[in-house]
Image (cartoon, grey):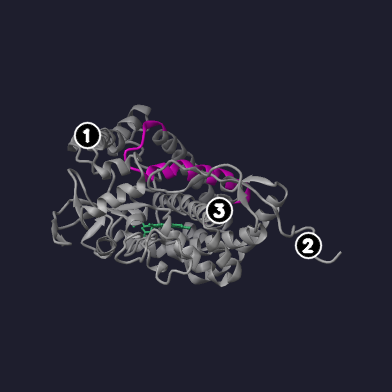
Amino acid sequence: MATTSRAGVWLRWASVHGIPRTFLSIRARRGEPLARLILGRGDREALIEEIRAAGPLLRTPVVWVSADYEVCRTVLRDNDFGVADPNETGLPDALLGLVRRVDPALPNPVEPPAMLMTDPPQHTEFRRLVARSFAPKSIAALDTRIGDLTAELLDDLDRRPEVDLISDYAALLPAAVISEVLGVPASERTRILGWGNTVAALLDIGIAWRPFRAAIDDLRDVDSYLGEHFGRLRADGGDGTPFSKLALDGSLSGRELTSNAALLIGAGIETTVNLIGNGIAALLGHPDQLALLRDDPGLWPSAVEEILRYDSPVQMTARTAHCDKEIAGSTIPKGAVVVLLLGGANRDPQVFERPDVFDVTRPNARDHLAFATGIHVCLGAALARIEGTTALRELFTRYPDLHLRAPAEPRGLVNLNGYRRLPAVLTPRVSARTAGPR
Ligand code: HEM
């Protein structure tokens, strides 16, 4: 029988996060770099370099780990590796059975049937259906909307010389875009954004009870909101968007539909906020690179690739070996989990010359693994690239003298890497309302 009781939710937290957290804390105290990295204890880049220095593939007491570009790429592209289910924590079967009965219908983006956490053939089918919302025609329509939405957001900023560029700008664009993909009205964007924010914590390993509980509470709201939303779309005959057609044609069950919609909220908002926020911070920290972009605006798309490489919004993912696999001279046994440090791979000196240098003209920046690769390669990559390029280019064009008025505040998550606040002063070059002939 299913349970949604607080005790049940706590049991689930304890098994998926609490026990691993205790174990990781012990390993972190002993100085193990992966445990310290996962718990956010210590300088991220230094810990990644420590892992890289130990070899292309490192075995730790529980998992394997790699910051090596070739190993990460190989594992992600090899279908002998599948997704790593966070519920597979080695619990005894009886306890696992109990845990699985907690909130079984919750649209958790890091659990099946969200496509991110499914293997073929189920993954192939879900991805094929959801991908219609990201087909070239849909992206072209969204591209135009992204331009309009960005202009509206900048017009709002014009009215306030002191802003927080995360909450007043970077977060609003992706929340508006995902709302449009899902057919959610503009009045609901703030709720969507709030959900994206809390649910983002679930992408970390060993999170504390409070953020876990907040995320689960929000997922219940997401579930009931999306259930009603898709019900309304069905009753009204849809709004013509690919996602509403999906809601109408019944090719996904109710649970599959809400889980994959919740995945778009979880995967599409916070990641893109980080791309925009990390881009603002990187460019303000490198005025010479900003000057290059001012001289040649055609460099913006390549600058976005470099931001994705240099300060990757998603730092890691994981895969499970379906059979014994020989990788980089080691045998990864069947069932073993490999943690792939995407941010580390993107700083691999064997692939990226002087990897710690931020260079918007880097010729091979686009080879980064910030969107992963293989069958789970980011479904929203084209959209994220457009959002990142438009948001950054338009911001720096309108406010060439933009500067921070207080230090940037990091987000405090481990896997989703970005800023919570970017307090800035804006001085418009030309105000949209005062420009033009008088
Ligand atoms: C800069 C922004 C973004 C970054 C860095 C990013 C990164 C990633 C990464 C690394 C993965 C693969 C994870 C893995 O293999 O374990 C992924 C998958 C995914 N992303 Fe993104 N993402 C971004 C934006 C978006 C957007 C805007 C959307 C949707 C509108 C989106 C939707 C998805 C979906 C649905 C998947 C799962 C694909 C699958 O399992 O086949 N992402 N993303």
**N-terminal of the two: label 2 or label 1?**
1
Q: Which residues are magenta?
A: 182-210
Q: Secondary structure at mark 2?
A: loop
On the image, which quarter does residue 429 sit in? bottom right
Give the left or right position of residue 101, taking residue 358 as reference.
left
**Disc 2 target residue:** 435
Residue with the most extreme front position:
288
User: In terms of depth relative to the viewer, which is nearer, 103 or 52?
Assistant: 52
Q: Is mark 1 within 8 Å of ligand 1?
A: no
Please name the residue that numbered disc 1 is placed on.
95
Asked if the beta carbon under badge 3 is closer than 8 A to the nearest atom of ligand 1, the reply is no
90 sits to left or right of 307: left
Name the amino acid type tagged 3: Ser
Separation of residues labelled 1 and 3 (CA atoms): 38 Å
Badge 1, how many Cα within 10 Å: few under 14, some, many 20+? Answer: few
Which x, y percent locates residue 237?
56, 58
Secondary structure under tag 1 reads helix
- Based on the picture, tell me whether residue 417 belongs to the magenta stretch: no
What separation in Å lies between label 2 and label 1 (alpha carbons)?
Answer: 66 Å
* Residue that mark 3 sits on: 179
Residue 320 x %, y %? 22, 53
Quarter occupied by the N terminus: top left
Image point (78%, 62%), residue name: 435
Residue 319 seen in the current view: no
Q: Quick one: label 3, few (<14), some, or many (20+) residues within 10 Å?
A: many
Q: Which amino acid type is marked by label 1?
A: Leu
For the residues marked 3 and 2, what is the alpha-carbon distance in whole angstroms? Answer: 31 Å
Marks 2, 1: nearer the viewer: 2
Q: Nearer the viewer, residue 248 or 39?
A: 39
Camera-side residue of 158 and 181: 158
Q: Is residue 193 magenta?
A: yes
